[in-house]
């Protein structure tokens, strides 16, 4: 119960900050989905998060998510994969997640679509965009983003719903603003290129230290871990950490 009370307090604070950022930008707060990033935390945190009213949970590893899902199978959760996905795990990912934020190649898209058709699933996909052009960063460079959008037209089961970005780490939230702004522009360019692409309605951007900037720049999903659950255990492997 103490854990639940703590997460509830954190959730109230985060929700108030999202509401303030949305109001300042003239946006409806209902447009913004809070994805609670439960990676590295165990079942107790998952249960407490759901009890506190969080129903979208984000994980960055397929295997870790599957373990939690098996233990938490009675809970009402929409699961989001926010970490890099290897194509040989496409099948498991499709079975485990409702949203996959990290599609970064046409090959991965096609594998996900085949896997989804085979197991009767229809996951929503986001294309992770590499706006920084860093070789070490994950995500598709812009030309590949366009190829993925084109290839999505012939997919049977998956739906490409938008874009995701993970800017280079900086302590200063304002450093992320140009990336968030560019992601929104890119979505507008893609939508202008064809009427079918108006279904690209999602922008997944913003984490604990910069979600207000992301909301100001048009985020429809913010991925927040630390601000809800506290610092992650140091022993755990955490991809995408600074
Ligand atoms: C871990 C992670 C987050 C959440 O980070 P916090 O700083 O704890 O809010 C968001 N997005 C991705 C891709 C992550 O890996």
Image (cartoon, grey):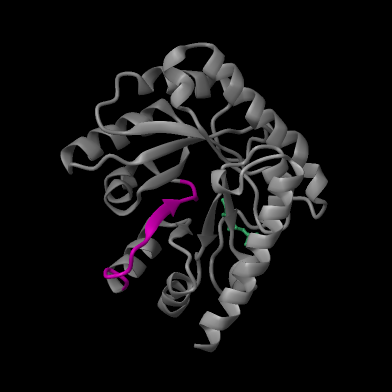
Q: Is residue 74 covered in magenta?
A: yes
Q: Nearer the viewer, residue 11 or 64?
A: 11
**In the image, 75: left or right of 61?**
left
Whether residue 112 is situated above or below residue 97 in the rendered picture: above
**In the image, 82: left or right of 141?**
left
- Residue 158 in percent (x, y) is at 31, 33
**Whereabouts is ligand 1, in terms of quadrant?**
bottom right
- Residue 147 in percent (x, y) is at 46, 18
Residue located 43% across and 70% down the image: 50
Quarter of the image for residue 226 reads bottom right
Answer yes or no: is residue 200 visible: yes
Quarter of the image for residue 230 reads bottom right
Answer yes or no: is residue 233 visible: no
Q: Nearer the viewer, residue 11 or 89?
A: 11
- Residue 154 in percent (x, y) is at 30, 19
Q: Nearer the viewer, residue 55 or 80?
A: 55
Outermost residue, top side: 193
Q: Which residues are magenta?
A: 72-84
Residue located 48% across and 65% down the image: 54
**In the image, 203: left or right of 104?**
right
Quarter of the image for residue 234 reads bottom right
Whether residue 96 is situated above or below residue 100 in the rendered picture: below
Q: How many marks?
A: 0
Q: Is residue 149 covered in magenta?
A: no
Residue located 65% across and 66% down the image: 227
Residue located 33% across and 64% down the image: 76
Q: Main secondary structure of the magenta part?
A: loop
Whether residue 147 is situated above or below residue 233 in the rendered picture: above
Position of the C terminus, as image quadrant, is bottom right
Q: Nearer the viewer, residue 117 or 162?
A: 162
- Residue 186 in percent (x, y) is at 62, 24
Outermost residue, bottom side: 2
């Amino acid at each position: 119960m103490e854990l639940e009370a703590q997460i509830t307090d954190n959730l109230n604070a985060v929700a108030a900050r999202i509401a303030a950022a949305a109001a300042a930008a003239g946006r409806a707060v209902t447009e913004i989905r809070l994805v609670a990033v439960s990676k590295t935390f165990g079942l107790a945190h998952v249960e407490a998060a759901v009890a506190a009213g969080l129903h979208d949970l984000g994980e960055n590893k397929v295997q870790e998510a599957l373990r939690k899902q098996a233990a938490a199978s009675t809970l009402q959760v929409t699961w989001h994969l926010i970490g890099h996905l290897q194509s040989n795990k496409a099948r498991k990912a499709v079975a485990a997640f409702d949203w996959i934020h990290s599609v970064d190649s046409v090959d991965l898209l096609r594998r996900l679509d085949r896997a989804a058709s085979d197991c009767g699933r229809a996951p929503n996909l986001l294309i992770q965009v590499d706006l920084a052009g860093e070789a070490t960063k994950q995500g598709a460079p812009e030309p590949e983003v366009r190829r993925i959008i084109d290839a999505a037209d012939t997919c049977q089961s998956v739906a490409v719903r938008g874009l995701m970005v993970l800017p280079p780490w900086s302590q200063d939230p304002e450093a992320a603003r140009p990336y968030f702004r560019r992601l929104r522009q890119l979505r507008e360019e893609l939508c202008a290129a064809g009427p079918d692409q108006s279904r690209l309605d999602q922008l997944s951007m913003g984490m604990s230290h910069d979600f207000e900037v992301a909301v100001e720049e048009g985020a429809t999903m913010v991925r927040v871990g630390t601000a809800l659950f506290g610092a992650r255990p140091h022993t755990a492997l955490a991809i995408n950490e600074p």
